[in-house]
Amino acid sequence: MVYESKYWLKSYNWKTPKTLSYPKIPAYYTFRNAAAYSPDMVATWFYGAEITYRELYQMVCCLANVLVEKGIKKGDRIGFLMPNCPQFVIAYWATLMAGAVVVNLNPLYTREELRELFEDADVSAIIAYDALVPMIKDLNKEAKISTIIVTKLSDFMLNIPVSTPEQLGMEEGWLHFSQLLKTDKLARPPLVDIKWDDPAVIQYTGGTTGIPKGAVLTQYNLTAGAMNVVLWSCGCIDNIRPEKKNVFSVLPFSHIYGEICCICEAAFSVSTMIILPRFDIDEVFDTLNKFESITYWPAVPTMLQALFYHPRVDEIDWHKKIIYCGTGAAPAPLALINKCREYDFSFFEGYGMSETAALAISTPYNAHRPSSCGVPYTDVDLRLVDEDGNDVPLGERGEIWMKSPYVMKEYWRNPEETARVFTEDGWLKSGDIAYMDEDGYVFIVDRTKDMIIAGGFNVYPRDVDEVLLKHPKVADAMTIGIPDEYRGENIKAFIQLKPGVESATPEEMIAFCREHLASYKVPRIIEFRAEALPRTNTGKALRRILRDEELTKTE
């Protein structure tokens, strides 16, 4: 079969390895090795405050020993509730070093969302920043979490006094992050027997109903991911002097995408992490202007959209400033691709899932193909199959099935969902529909669950989104199906206009769609939104939120 031959390997960059041998080691060894190779290299930059790899390693070892002393055992779950900061990096490696499991929790979650995930993950400890102290106090009345560690972002900034437990409103028995790092602990890892296939991270992935599923990613998944993110771009990155290597770390660390492509990538490549706690447009411009160049920037298209349509865009020589940029989580509109080309800036699209450590498909260096997310990553076995599980011919649409070193072990305590998403012979069923061309490039069409059935026709909402995004007035678009007694579903599109656009009408948007889409795909209803359309913190469309809003209107 064509997929078994991995014929897409012919499209790889000349320097990208076709296959690799992955060491079966604890994931923190990549960071441990970096501290040995380059102890004086700056590991983190945070608003001008720098920590070397040696200093960071000593902090990690100290915290790992504290965790073990406090009763954290191998396999215990530790919930992370912090934006990007050096404390997150320290806690991440310390948790893995202690043999515990990182539970990614978005600090923007509501109280109820956190309550459900605390209970589902059965967390033994929480590491959080001070803004969430009131919520954690409230939640802990029920959760009764024994170990709670609190920090303040400014504790790791220049020329700002370190906070005290009293200032942070901590309760008796809670632990202050910075004070823990001053305890007299050995600057070497605790003796924990960590296996290569032990759980390392639980990444919750959104579902349409109920509690999200927790994708269990192993030590092996993280090690393989770190290696491949670095080696995929080696045709470019290898040309950068070691002391100049850095990673612009704006992607949220609270998602596996940010952890693999920032924290783990930086350790394996021995790079400086330039850390910002959030994507603030002026802060991003100010930070970029402080550095001669950025070696690697993992991003999402909405970040690029914000930068390249901003009045400050001409401040940056983009060709010189960003050496390698990879995007994922959502497709980049053709208008954005063309806008970036005007500034001689190239980025390379990719595709991944929480269940695959955010890695699956990526664009080979200097070989971008519009509307494609690239070719299967190193050591990814990929098939496109029909509803009966049979491979579809090239050019035809099918569901992506995968095997790879990045595929999760299971869903956390959810054997039913695990069995549903894996075939008997180990293929992960993605739920994403795509087709592949003769060079192995994959073109994502849509999610199976998002497909609209209107008048008996199957409509993939991304087909409609992509047309609307070509309209000069449209900044973002999201299409859903809403119930209709006669047609089954009607097609409705939500549109956010570009800044400065004073007006637009539903009629002009529908007329524009008629020029580019088959009649059955043209939306019948258009709604303009002043605020941003609902997306995850990594940019994926949250169509279910819009669907739920529509269903509420009809009740």
Image: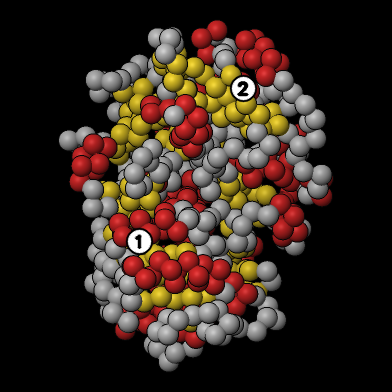
Relative placement, left or right, of 447 versus 364 is left
- Where residue 179 appears, as percent x and y from the top left, is 50, 86
Question: Mark 1 near mark 2, Cβ–Cβ under 8 Å?
Answer: no
Secondary structure of residue under mark 1: helix
Element class at badge 2: strand
Q: Quadrant of the C terminus?
A: top left
In the image, 56: left or right of 156?
A: left
> Is any atom of residue 98 visible in this view?
no
Residue situated furthest front in the rendering: 555
Q: Residue at x 68, y 69 (%)?
A: 47
Residue visible at 44% across and 11% down? 487
Residue nearest the observer in this picture, 228 or 488: 488
Q: Amino acid at mark 2?
A: Ile
According to the picture, the residue beneath numbered tag 2 turns out to be: 526
**Residue beneath label 1, please?**
118
User: What residue is rendered at 61% in x and 47% in y?
Assistant: 324
- Expressed as whole percent of the image width and height from the top left, the position of residue 134 reads 50, 70
Q: Given the current orientation, which residue lies at the most extreme left position?
A: 424
Q: Residue 503: x, y in percent?
A: 77, 26
Residue type indicated by callout 1? Phe
Q: Which mark sits nearer the N-terminus, 1 or 2?
A: 1
Quick check: 263 left or right of 407?
right
Q: Residues within 10 Å of mark 1 (few under 14, many from 20)?
A: many
Q: CA distance from mark 1 to mark 2?
A: 39 Å
* Colouring of the image: secondary structure
Q: Is residue 194 left or right of residue 93?
A: left
Q: Is residue 329 above or below residue 100?
A: above
Q: Nearer the viewer, residue 158 or 318?
A: 158
| As drawn, 554 above or below 82 | above
Q: Residue at x 38, y 51 (%)?
A: 204
Residue 533 visible from this viewpoint: yes
